[in-house]
Structures are given as C-alpha cells and as structure tokens.
Image: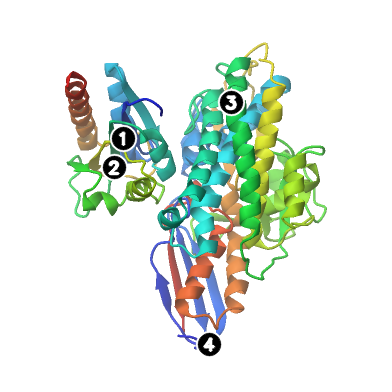
Amino acid sequence: MTHRSDRALHVAGLARVEGEGAMHVRVDGGRVTDVRLEIYEPPRFFEAFLRGRGYTEPPDITARVCGICPVAYQLSACRAIEDACGVTVDGALADLRRLLYCGEWVSSHALHIYLLHAPDFLGYDGAVELAADHRALVERGLALKRAGNVLMEVIGGRAVHPVNVRLGGFYRVPARADLAALVPMLRRALDDALATVEWVAGFEFPDFTHQHELLALVEPGRYAIESGQPATDRGLRFPVSGMDEQIREEQVPHSTALHARLAGRGLYTTGPLARYALSGQWLPPLARQAADAAGLGPVCRNPFRSIVVRAVELTGALEEALRLVAQYEPPAVAAVEVPPAAGTGYGATEAPRGVLFHRYRLAADGTVLSARIVPPTAQNQASVEDDLRRFVADRLALDDHTLTHQCEQAIRNYDPCISCATHFLDLRMERR
Amino acid sequence: MTGRQMVVIGVGNPYRRDDGFGPVVVSLLADRHLPDLKLATSDGEPTRLIELWTGATLAVVVDAVRTDPARPGRVHRLSAYHPAVRGAVPASSHGTGLGEAVDLALVLDRLPDRLLLYAVETDQVGFGAGLSAPVAEAAVRVAAEIAELVRVREVA
C-alpha cells in the first residue's frame, strides 16, 4: 500500500544486528511523528557489578559485555585504570596492544560487511541466502574474519574474550617467530580486503546524508585505534579525562539506556564515518589509495556508505598489522607494574563501532569505587533515531515492506552492538 | 581447526546467570583432561561456531535455551538436523544463534560429521554471575554424559 497518510506497520525482530532491542516508528497523517529506540534491560549492570571489585578485574569482566569487541573493552579498561594508577604503557607493549586491536577490527568489520550488511545491498534476506548464490564471496568474508581471529588468538590467547591481556601489558608476549608465521595469512587477507573495497564500492547507495557532528579519537600521524584524543569535525577537542564534562547522558522515557549528547552542542556520531573524516589523511597507503579509488573523498556523510569506509578500515588494519609484525621485537617484560593508587582514571579506544569510554575511581588499595562505561552504540542511538526520522519522511511513498526493510538497513549502517547496551530488539512501525 | 578432532563448544555468557551453562560444562570437562578433545567457549556468533567445528568428527554445542513454560535444568539432546535446532531461540545476549550457523554451514559444506546440541532450560538469564541450582546440577550431569560420549568414540 502506498501513498497512504495513515498506516501501521509492525515488524517483529530486527535481524543481523548484534544484540536485541526495539525500534518504534510512527507515521501520523503523512508525517513522521515519533521515532524511538527502545531499550529494556538495565545497561548499567556492569558498572554496578564492578563496584567493590579489585582494580585488576575490570579488563576481564567488561570483556564479557560483548563477544564481538572484547579487546575494545579490555583496552579501554586497562587504559583507564593505568591512568588512575599513574602508569603509561608505551613502546613495544603499546604496539602489541595495537596489533591485537587490529585483529579485532579485521574480525568485526569482516563479519559486519559480509554477513550482516552486504545482504541488504544485494537483495538477500541474510548471509545464508547470499552464500547459496555467492559462496566464494562469503568464503572470502569468512577467511578475512578468520585472519582477525587468528591474530587475536596468537596475541590474546583466544579470539573470544582474550585471556592474555592484563593491566600493564600481557601475561606473556609472543615470540618473533609466532608473529612472523602469520605474514602469509595477513598478506592474503590484505588482498582480500582490497578486493572487498572494490566490491562494496560498486553497491547502490540511497541518496541520503546527515550533518551530525562527528566524534573520534585523533592521534596526529596515524589512524587512531587504541589511543588518541577525542575530537570532532567542528573543532571540539578535549582530553579523555574531559569525558564527564563533554559527554552528557540523559534518560529518555522510552529507554533504560542513556542517550549521549555533547555538552552544549547536541547529538553526534561516532564510528567509521567519524574516524575517516578526522583521520583519513593518516590511513596507511594502500587503504588511502583504496578510499580514493572508491570515491570516498575527504569526508563521507552518507551512513549507507559506511560499509565502504569499513572495508577501507579493514584494509588499513591489515596493512598496519603487517607493519607491526615486521618491526616486532619482543618487549623486555610482558607487563609493566601497575601498583594501585587512589584516584580517578579515564580511558578511551576506538572500538570497531566507535569510541568506547571508560572511567574508574579507585581506593588506595585498588578497590573499584565507581565505574562509568560509555559504549559507542549508546552514543549513536540519537543519530540512528535522527537518520530514521528523516529517512522515513523522504520515503513515505514506498510500500510498507520496502520501507521497513530500508529502515532496518539504516539501523545496520551503524553496526549497532545493542548487547553492549541492551537486550532484545524488535522493530515496530506504525502509520496512521 | 585442522585435524579430525572432537570439539565441545560451550555457548553463553557467565555474567548472564544460567546463560553461563555452556562455559560451565566446558570448564567441568577441562577438569577431566580428556585427550584429543578440543574445548572452546563462544558467544554463539555463527561464523565462529562454524570455524570451531569445521572438519570435526564430532561437535557438541552446549547452550542454554528459553522455553515457555520452563522446567529449569531439563536437558534437551538434539541433532543438528532437528527442526527445533533450526528455530532455536538462544538465551544468550546475542540474537543470532545455532540455527543460522547450521544453515550457513550446510550451504558452505562446513558441518562436522556429527553435530549434537545439549540445551538446558533456564531459570534466570538476567545480569549476574552463577548458575541457578537446577541448572548447576544439570551442568554436572551433562559434562559426565559428554565425557562418556567422547570416551566411547575414542574406543571405537
């Protein structure tokens, strides 16, 4: 049914999103009157769960928030607690952390590009249907994901919830030969990543852009991953320790999750589009060339093209992994000492979905007194709602099935990991 | 996975109460030090499951399921081809599940020779650590049963 001003749609279950939640869209009298991302379960459980724990525990505990990006949680937690204790991890240990993080980016981006997002652009219901017609493509995606997993296993001990990460570094560091053995696999993966950019750049993208302020970590000279300073494309820049003043979270009636805003500025977007806008000039060379060939330009504001940016980042992460492996010399110690200290520490890293902020307040004996976690999906919720509001308003002539499908696709642009923030997603659209 | 191995995969999150059933069973099996048995835990992400069981002679997936009405601690033993597996509703905090993994593995010829699911009915899957009593008891029973299953196949 098209060209109807009052309509009601209901779609149960939003597929191909990590985690579950609910999206409610109401169209009333031909106008979009309400868009809400509904979240049911207490997202702050882990913050409460951490209180009273020992200061060495948050990296392992918070890694359980999400199986897709455990390294992000571990390293944001490590950086925040090390900050509280006055310890800086640098040199070869910091490089090893970056290498581990590259593995997570490769694994997460490959999963999202090939199995969660590409089916939208190619007219398939999901990865199974895509694989039935294009087995070689899906196999390439799985090989890429496996390369990321292997990298995480060699450094982190295992790919899901790595066990080798600790405050100050690692329990043990790999031998040079352990990493050198990965080079053939990483080179093949780099070729596959370049082919991925070409593939997804050829998709058809809806004509849609947003003007959200873009927030990412910035580390001049290189593409920020495991460290950097928060900055926006409109000139805001603040230290990670400014997260409490700059990132305001507000309760909204329809959700138990908090909606993030930049203080005095409004909603913002974090993730691949933001990273690319702020650090695109520091992409490794092949990734930079691939971005140019894909026609991305210096800034991409079409969230549907985030799949291209992810493919470029996939390429960059593999280039960076190869560089770090080539220069690797095992650190003299597997971890630096992190003695407990009373104080508050802040940490932020670039999870595949965007900036992940952690803050811990410690007692002198290292007991965690309070914790704050601001995951990227929670930060992007307001952006997702804004995109949907405008996206639906421009497409009311579409039939219900097509419009609903395109809304789901618009949500998947953000690769939302709702399990970071919530549970149970259900898409509901009403037109009256 | 490269060899012709047996693998037990515990799916779940130990911080989601009874959803930690699979990892607990894997931990109990690890205590038995069974030779030639690969043990793994997973959040149930389909491609990860496929990676873990590709090439295996036997793969056992241990998971928690929500049922209505539920009898916490009741264990279901199903083969991968059972219709209930294909439409299983995982209790885990990730929405995708074993059914999608089996469907994708079928298309990609990546199913193990034999794939079994041990699924326990849950009591609580909210945030928190530790299994409820009936589910904890079921974990001991299931670990013993899988150990016997593996031992018999090794002898064979």
Nearer the observer, disc 4 or disc 2?
2
Question: At x 60% / y 72%, what residue is drawn?
Answer: A391
A256 sits left or right of B90 in the view: right
Indicate which disc residue B55 carries: none
Indicate which disc residue A182 carries: 3
Amino acid type assigned to the residue bearing label 3 in the image: Leu
Whether callout 4 and callout 2 share a subunit is answered no
Whether callout 2 and callout 1 share a subunit is answered yes
Q: CA distance from mark 2 to mark 1?
A: 7 Å
The reply to whether callout 2 and callout 1 are in contact (CB within 8 Å) is yes
Q: CA distance from mark 2 to mark 3?
A: 35 Å
Q: Position of residue A390 (x, y in %)?
A: 62, 73
What residue did someone put label 4 on? Answer: A29
> Residue A391 versus residue A2: which sits nearer the camera?
A2
Amino acid type assigned to the residue bearing label 2 in the image: Ala
Indicate which disc residue B64 carries: 2
Amino acid type assigned to the residue bearing label 4 in the image: Gly
Amino acid type assigned to the residue bearing label 1 in the image: Gly
Q: CA distance from mark 1 to mark 4?
A: 50 Å
Question: At x 40% / y 45%, what residue is drawn?
Answer: B46
What residue did someone put label 1 on? Answer: B22
Nearer the observer, disc 1 or disc 4?
1
